[in-house]
Image: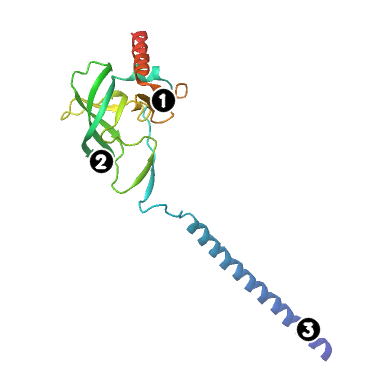
Amino acid sequence: MKRKYIISMLSAVALVGVIVYWIQQAEKNNDLSIADSKIVVSSKDEPKTNDKPKVLTSLSLGKSYDSVEALTDAADLVAQINITGIQGILPEQDSTRYNAEVTDVLKGSESKDSIVITQVGIKKDGVDEETETPYFKQGDELVIFLKKGQDPKIDPIYYVAGEYQGKFNIENGKVYAVNPALKNQYIDGQNLSAFKESIRNIIKEQK
């Protein structure tokens, strides 16, 4: 009987030891999971390449166009312009207004040499932003497709058709689409005179 009692006690002690061991292992695994989750969170912080913070701005389109013909048809004014500076900032509308000099009207009846263009987004000082459409800056020269806007205090005022789709930068006498959004006709280095002539031909065909 005494021997059986000793064996039973040893078995009970061993069982308790096994239970304690599994409890300790479970606690270690839980700590490891917590540590791993912290590592995952911290890994989202990418190393900075410069001192300026970077944010991603996504701009929505009220209307999208798939060709230059569609842009031309929708636009109230198609013109070659120069951006001369910022007219004002509208924080409540998350937009910026720019002054622009009209140098050549391809479509529309705009008679004034200076217009105002509204663009979605506000450029933040000291911040490099990645956007679907770069902000205008003073000195930019473009062929641009515009829709007439409304403001009782400012006339004429316009906004870009298709937001980024209606902007074509001019560089060294060539035209480049700001964003490759036109599915069928991406403009990448077309001669300025030829591009403007093609627009005039589209306008003739649409009349």
Give the labeled residue for mark 1.
189
| Secondary structure beneath label 3 | helix
* Mark 1, secondary structure of its residue: strand
Q: Position of residue 96 (x, y in %)?
A: 26, 37
Residue that lies at the very extreme toward the bottom in this rendered image: 2
Instruction: Residue 70: tell me if it is visible.
Output: yes
Query: How far apart are the alpha carbons under marks 1 and 3?
Result: 90 Å
User: In the figure, 51 relative to 159: above or below?
Assistant: below
Q: Residue at x 25, y 41 (%)?
A: 92
Q: Nearer the viewer, residue 7 or 31?
A: 31
- Which structural element holds mark 2? helix
Q: Are marks 1 and 3 in contact (CB under 8 Å)?
A: no
Residue bearing mark 3: 8
Q: In this view, does 10 lie to the left or right of 51?
A: right
Marker disc for residue 92: 2
Depth check: give the residue in front, 69 or 168.
168
Q: Where is residue 135 in the image (x, y as percent from the top left)?
A: 32, 36
Q: Which mark is residue 132?
A: none
* Quadrant of the image containing the N terminus: bottom right
Residue 83 position by quadrant: top left
Quadrant of the rendered structure where residue 149 is? top left
Question: Spatial distance from mark 2 to mark 3, Cα to Cα?
Answer: 79 Å
